[in-house]
Image (spheres, rainbow, N blue to C red):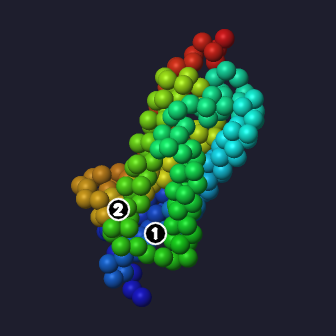
Amino acid sequence: MTKATVDGGVPSGRDGDRAIRTSGTIGASRPLAWLLVITGAAGVLAAWVITLDKFKLLEDPNFVPGCSLNPIVSCGNIMKSEQASVFGFPNPMLGLVTYGMVVAIGVALLAGARFRRWYWLGLNAGTLFGVGFCTWLMQQSLYEINSLCLWCCLAWVATIVMFWYVTSHNVRNGVLPAPAALRGFLDEFTWILPVLHIGIIGMLVLTRWWDFWTG
């Protein structure tokens, strides 16, 4: 098997991501594969804990989840909200499926799997939907429900990280068309994007309840 191109002609950068094109398929490096496994597992963990607590809350309306630490960090308030079942069933049930799929993709890549362009586009679309949904949930948590769930925050971070690295992989391998300058930037500085994204969310959380944190 001959390695035809690496990263669409762009040298591998600090994130260590190398993709191999063979017969119309695109692989990925072990670092990217492990990133998908780890972020997917973090999402599964968060969804699993929230699902268990949701069942306990249904059995006992007075049940207080372990992550309900104060009036602001209160998973119970989140679970009791309408936003927690926006599709007609508890949101974490969706997370158990989707994050589990990400783990499976990461494991497949670790085993040497390569996927066609449409598959990578589908993964990118899925992570984009995830980021959009997490952004909406964040907005609802901060400005409508007025509470935070630590497990939800873990899922937000995991989704943001996997989205930016999958997008970077696709841009640098020509799955998503982009100018050479952008491919070069992502080759070296992909890490800046999730750090900046998560940093903005952190600032929003800090300023939303500034009096509480500093009181």
Horizontal and vertical percent position of residue 94: 53, 51
Residue reaching furthest bottom? 1
Q: Quadrant of residue 23?
A: bottom left
Crowdedness near tag 1: few (<14), some (14–19) or many (≥20) residues, C-alpha within 10 Å: many
What type is the residue that disc 1 sits on? Ala
- Residue drawn at point x = 57 percent, y = 69 percent: 107
According to the picture, the residue beneath numbered tag 1 turns out to be 28
Horizontal and vertical percent position of residue 89: 54, 45
Q: Quadrant of residue 69?
A: top right
Q: 65 or 19: which is nearer to us?
A: 65
What type is the residue that disc 2 sits on? Leu
- Residue drawn at point x = 39 percent, y = 86 percent: 2
Horizontal and vertical percent position of residue 53: 70, 41
According to the picture, the residue beneath numbered tag 2 turns out to be 121
Q: Quadrant of residue 77?
A: top right
Q: Find the distance from the CA under tag 2 to the CA under tag 1.
A: 14 Å
Residue 188 numbered tag: none
Q: 89 or 12: which is nearer to us?
A: 89
Q: Secondary structure at mark 2?
A: helix
Q: Earlier in the sequence, mark 2 or mark 1?
A: 1
Q: Would residue 104 be visible to someone looking at this image? A: yes
